[in-house]
Amino acid sequence: MQVRLTINGQPHELDVAPHRSLADVLRTDLAMTGTKVACAEGTCGSCTVLLDGRAVLSCLTFASACDSSKVATVEGSTPLLERLRDAFTAHDGFQCGFCTPGQLMSAVALLQRTPRPSRAEIRTAMAGNLCRCGAYEGIEQAVAAAAEAG
Ligand code: FES
Ligand code: FES
């Protein structure tokens, strides 16, 4: 079926089978491999993207259900995403970096709805994003620093 998506501000028209995930379409059809897939079953958060401003797990989201939606991925460039990228670098918010795209997109969603979150709100908002390297302290500090810099 035909699906129209605006991804990071760019319009796309795609022919996708109804069962395919948004993560698969982004990575395979559009070569947007910044969105990672670790578990493919909704438990790790590495595939997090924004769908009409809301953080979603793109491995569990049917691309066919996203017609006429706006998608934001880690390949995008917005002042908030850039601020978070800088803060993750400055505060050691990653080690291997595999979880980082999902962490960044969850943090974007958080700071868009709550520009000055408490540490507890940061931990709650980021709880669905697992980090096998255990970089949680740096991630929390990075999100807090990006909020303070906004
Ligand atoms: S890859 Fe989607 S939640 Fe793990
Ligand atoms: S930085 Fe390696 S999984 Fe998070």
Image (tube, rainbow, N blue to C red):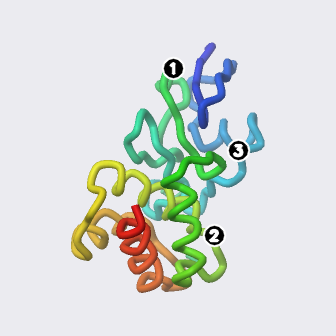
Helix, strand or loop at disc 1?
Answer: loop
Spatial CA span between label 1 and label 2: 28 Å
* Residue positioned 62% across, 83% down in the render: 95
**Residues tagged 1 and 2 counted as in contact (Cβ below 8 A):** no
Check the image and name the residue furthest to the front. 149
Marked residue nearer the N-terminal end (2 or 3): 3
Where residue 119 sits, quadrant-wise, is: bottom left
- Vertical comparison of 13 with 31: above or below: above
Q: Quadrant of the N terminus?
A: top right
Name the side, left or right, on which 134 lies relative to 6: left
Amino acid type assigned to the residue bearing label 1 in the image:
Asp
Q: Is mark 2 within 8 Å of ligand 2?
A: yes
Mark 3 surroundings within 10 Å by alpha-carbon count, few (fewer than 14), some (14 through 19), many (20 or more): some
Amino acid type assigned to the residue bearing label 2 in the image:
Phe
Mark 1 surroundings within 10 Å by alpha-carbon count, few (fewer than 14), some (14 through 19), many (20 or more): some
Marked residue nearer the N-terminal end (1 or 2): 1
Helix, strand or loop at disc 2?
Answer: loop
- In the picture, the disc for residue 40 is none
- Residue 46 in picture, x, y percent from top left: 53, 61
Helix, strand or loop at disc 3?
Answer: helix
Q: Which residue is mark 1?
A: 67
Q: Which residue is mark 2?
A: 98
- Vertical comparison of 108 with 17: above or below: below
Mark 2 surroundings within 10 Å by alpha-carbon count, few (fewer than 14), some (14 through 19), many (20 or more): some
Q: Which residue is mark 3?
A: 27
**Residues tagged 1 and 3 counted as in contact (Cβ below 8 A):** no
User: Ligand 2 sits in which quadrant?
Assistant: bottom right
Check the image and name the residue furthest to the top. 2
Q: Quadrant of the C terminus?
A: bottom left
- Residue 133 in picture, x, y percent from top left: 55, 84
